Image: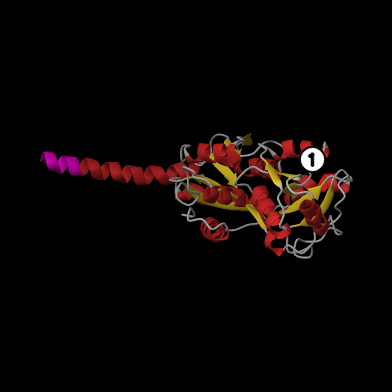
Amino acid sequence: MRKIMLVIVAMTFGLAQGVLQPAQAQDFPTRPIALVVPYGPGSGVDILAREIAQKLTGIVGVPVVVENKAGATGNIGTEFVAQAKPDGYTLLLSSNSGVIYQIVSKTRFDLSRDFAAVAFAATLPYVVAVPPALEAKTLAELMALARANPGKLNYNGPVGSVSDYLGSILKSAAGAEMVMIPYKTTSDAQVDLLSGRIQVWFTTATSALPLAQSGKIRALAVTSDERMAKLPDVPTVREAGVPAMHMDVTFFFLAPAGTPPDIVQKLNRAFAQALESKDLQDRLSTQALAVKIGSSQEVKAHVAGELAKWGKILGSDAAR
């Protein structure tokens, strides 16, 4: 009899759990949602997160707030979300940078294993920029300058970032030594570029665009397939003779592994609704960002594909 009662209790508990789980998803959200940006304020990814958060707030009915947790090439913010409660209230805005960092570093997290894919956000090219006072007016002239002055040209990092990767490709193409200076935020690197402490700045088009348009920096090339409409005179890296530097950064949202699928799908629909908004698309386009929409399964496949691709590119077996 005791065994029968235990079985009945277990079955009842299981049924209750099955009833409660959809109810949790149905009621979600009931409190603020945090979008964690693993970089400092003012970066391209920070601007993207804030634009989406503003639109998303009106859709989900609760405040959507951006939390900047910069440091260790995005590692601090990424680990924070990986260890957060899997309830849909803490999300990470990641990108190719997170993929590259996982491959080149011994991270304790895995973007495929420790996260649930939620939604895409946008795509964005990088820009190769220099101070206007630097003699180089083209990418070819920059490489020639680097060869003539080995070890005297500095560019921004940190190790494992897209900037570091692009700098490595440029050094290889030029056959010259350049020095990578690690920065915690792109804003810090920007300050040093404008003051002449570094000579080459690899940054998102969002960060570069206003400075290039005002003449405070000279954009030498963009990493996209086509020239940017807002910088029509700036060639692509392919046109400039360094096709290996071609890349577009894709941003995507992740939740901690174990987040209920119903909540993931509810978030995916909310992000899609936000990104389909014409006014949001217009605002993002002024920042050189193009929205990207897809299912959570497509995001999952994208992350896995990027890990495999960059693992081969970077010659590492760290892609998992």
x and y percent of residue 25 in the render? 47, 44
Q: Is residue 275 above or below residue 29?
A: below
Nearer-the-camera pick, 34 or 205 = 205
Label 1 crowd (10 A; few <14 / some 14-19 / many >=20) = many
Residue 137 is inside the magenta segment: no
Provide residue 107's location: percent of width, then percent of height: 49, 44
**Is any part of residue 282 visible from this angle?**
no
Which SS type dominates the magenta stretch?
Answer: helix
What residue sits 79% from the left and 65% below the top? 239
Q: Quadrant of the N terminus?
A: top left
Q: Is residue 272 left or right of residue 187?
A: left
- Asked which quadrant contains residue 147, the reply is bottom right
- Element type at mark 1: helix
Which amino acid type corresponds to the residue marked 1 in the rendered image?
Answer: Leu
Q: Which residues are magenta?
A: 1-7
Instruction: Name the residue beneath numbered marker 1.
Output: 193
**Residue 315 seen in the figure:** yes
Task: Please tell me which residue lies in front, 11 or 236.
Answer: 236
Q: Is 2 inside the magenta-drawn segment?
A: yes
**Residue at position x 54%, y 39% from top?**
90
Q: Residue furthest left?
A: 1
Q: Is residue 139 above or below residue 198?
A: below
Q: Position of residue 216 (x, y in %)?
A: 87, 43
Instruction: Relative to 61, say whether 242 is above or below.
Output: below
Image colouring: secondary structure
Q: Nearer the viewer, residue 30 or 221?
A: 221
Rendered residue at 87%/48% (across/down) = 213
Residue under the image location 48 percent in, 56 percent down: 317
Front one among 247 and 273? 247
